[in-house]
Structures are given as C-alpha cells and as structure tokens.
Amino acid sequence: MVKRTAQPPAAGEPKPTLVLLVRHGLTPTTGTTLPGRAPGLHLAPEGVEQADAAAQRIAPLRSKVSAVYASPLERTQETAAPVAKAVRKRVRTEAGLLECDFGRWTGAKLKDLAKLPEWKTVQKYPSGFRFPKGESFAEMQARITGTIDRLVARHAGGTVVAVSHADPIKAAVAQALGTHLDLFQRIVISPCSITAILYTTTGPVVLSVNSTGGDLAALAAS
C-alpha cells in the first residue's frame, strides 16, 4: 500500500499549514435538539470540562500555534477560551466557522425532525437539500472550506486552531478527503474532538479525524 506523504515545499513555495478543527463541547441540548445559530446556548458543565481537556491537548503545540479562531456563537467561544489561554493567544471571531443555517428547523427536536420525509434526504442526499428558509449543505461546505482557505493563506506555515460545529467540520473533512458531500454523514465529529488537516500546495493531508485523546504533538504526515 502506497501512502501519500506531505512533500517538503520547493524553494519559494509556502510551507504547509496545520489546521486543528475543534468541535465545541457538550451543551444541554446536544443530541436532542437542532440549535443552529440561535443565541444563548452555553456549554454544559461536562462541555466545560471537555474544553479544558482539549486545551491541555493543544497546549504542547503552543510555540507553533499562530492563531485561535471560533464561530460567533457562545458554545464555540466558550470552547475556544481555554484553548486560547493555553497557547497564549486571543480568540478571534470568524463568521465563516458558523453552524449551518437550519432556517425554520432551528430549535426543533431531532426526534420530531426524524419523522419528516425530508429527513431521508438530509441523510442520503444532503448535496441536494436546502433547509427551509436556510442554507443548503453545498453552501455550508463552500463557506467552511473557503474560510479554511483564507485562514491557511493568512497563517502560511503555522498552526491554526478553528473551533466550529459538527456539520461544517464534517463537510471540511469530506472535501479534504475528496469524498462526495452525499457521504459526509458517515463522518463522526464528537464534542470537543480535534480533527487535524495539513494543507499543502499539492492538496490537504488528513492526519486525524474525531480525535478525543492522545498526544497531538505526535501528529505527522507519513
């Protein structure tokens, strides 16, 4: 089996940029409700502990981290805060890291949404679905990948921490893997998991997906 390796950059080429995509920690509604972009949802006590644990995992990379970004929502800002403290950076708010706009489905119970005929489309054909009065999955993927591209260009050769939400991170992973958006629901992104993608001039290299433990300092393309 031949593995793809991250080749050293040629003279004059930008160095690879490592992006650590962190999902926010648990909230009181995680797994039961589709909160979307509604304001006022904070981390649950367990989510606060998860954020602290994620910060401890990222802390050994302090000297390499160029910036810490988070979506504007409270749950991502609260997750990013201990991470930023651990690497001695401030949290920068980036709207491109926002959760998908679920439109009229915002705040709905997942058990109720699962009864709708449209739910099968969400699971099986997401590339063809738009949330009522909201965003399409395709638009969400274009938004999150475009945001990552900007952050990579801004911090070329560094390490960027980006705290976002499950669906946008899944969409970014699918794009990095060259996987069609219709298969992105097969990717699992747990609360406060860390997904590491190395962006090079010849394309992304996925180093880790949904990592919830272990030494991040050992991450390397091989």
Image (cartoon, rainbow, N blue to C red):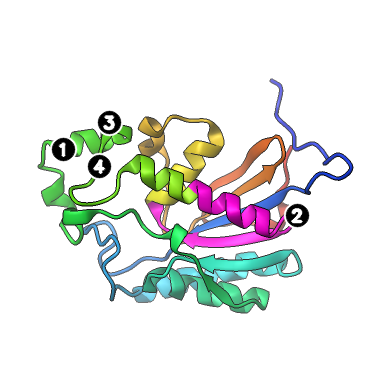
Sequence-wise, the earlier of marks 2 and 1 is 1
Sequence-wise, the earlier of marks 3 and 4 is 3
**In the rendered structure, are the residues bearing label 1 and label 4 in contact, judged by CB atoms less than 8 Å apart?**
no
Quarter residue 72 falls in: bottom left
Picture coordinates of residue 105 (x, y %)? 18, 54
Picture coordinates of residue 174 (x, y %)? 48, 37
Q: Is residue 118 above or below residue 34?
A: above
Q: CA distance from mark 1 to mark 4?
A: 10 Å
Nearest to viewer (mark 2 / mark 3):
2
Asked if residue 69 lies left or right of residue 61, the reply is left
Q: Which residue is mark 1?
A: 118
Picture coordinates of residue 92 (x, y %)? 55, 72
Sequence-wise, the earlier of marks 4 and 2 is 4
**In the rendered structure, are the residues bearing label 2 and label 1 in contact, judged by CB atoms less than 8 Å apart?**
no
Q: CA distance from mark 3 to mark 4?
A: 13 Å
Q: Which residue is mark 4?
A: 130
Q: Which residues are magenta?
A: 145-166
Picture coordinates of residue 106 (x, y %)? 20, 59
Q: Which residue is mark 3?
A: 124
Q: Which residue is mark 2?
A: 157
Asked if residue 119 lies left or right of residue 22, the reply is left
Q: Residue furthest right?
A: 11
Q: Is residue 208 above or below residue 48?
A: above
* Callout 3 amino acid: Lys
